[in-house]
Amino acid sequence: MENFYKQLLEKNKDWVAKKLDENPEFFDNLAQGQKPPLLWIGCSDSRVPANEIIGAPPGEVFVHRNIANMVIHTDMSMLSVLDYAVNALKVKHIIVCGHYGCGGVKAALTNDSIGIIDNWIRHIKDVYRFHHKELDLMKDETERFNRFVELNIVEQVYDLAKTSIVQKAWESGQELMIHGWVYGVHNGLVKDLNLTMKDNNSLAEVYQLDF
Ligand code: CO
């Protein structure tokens, strides 16, 4: 146990040495500031490391991760990350990246009580309720689980578009695209769900804000 912990610090030193070997100014450049073009909203799952799966170096991705990549409008952490990314960093893209085999989404399919997390998972159950006609038709459990993962991502993309932060950016003509991705932990590949949003026209009218 102690050994594992010590190794982390050793690995950090190795990483620094490798980076400096490749580019002696690597950290000096990063210390100047950040201008990432991308906000990543992903799952906390240890198998889905944001930068690594898209080959992005430090400085390229602003990251928010939580259980099942949720966009919950009362989540101050998510709202603060979104506000800073859109209004200060002026990111051009937001990617909501979920993944097949997501434990949070799987938990939402059961009636088990796990603890406080039940209240977080409840938001995923809402996604099931919105789409229960399609999901209930699927007899194959894996197929239904996979589709539920995808639909949860779709809803989080819409939930981002519903925020006053995103709508205001669009209203002011800021270039900002929101995408939904699903990552395959079994093969490493990303599937683009092709639901890119760049204005609030595809939101139901009731959500569209006038500023
Ligand atoms: Co997950």
Image (tube, helix red, strand yellow):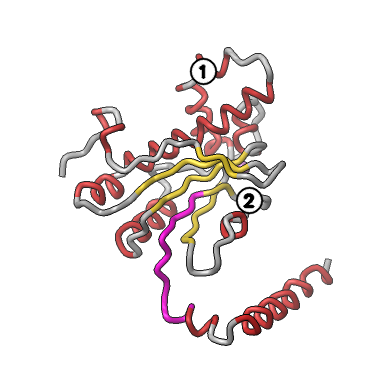
Ligand 1: does it lie within 8 Å of the C-beta at label 1?
A: no
Judged left or right of residue 81, residue 167 is left
Position of residue 200 relative to residue 110, above or below, is below
Ligand 1: does it lie within 8 Å of the C-beta at label 2?
A: yes
Residue identified by numbered label 1: 132
Position of residue 64 relative to residue 182, above or below, is below
In-front residue for pair 23/127: 23
Residue identified by numbered label 2: 48
Viewer-side label of 1, 2: 2
Label 1 amino acid?
His
Q: Is residue 32 magenta?
A: yes
Residue situated furthest bottom in the rendering: 24
Label 2 amino acid?
Val
Stretch of the chain drawn in magenta: 30-41
Indicate the position of residue 44 as horizontal and vertical percent values. 60, 50
In-front residue for pair 62/184: 184
Judged left or right of residue 167, residue 197 is right
- Residue at the location (29% across, 53% down)? 175
Q: Is residue 7 magenta?
A: no
Indicate the position of residue 155 as horizontal and vertical percent values. 44, 33
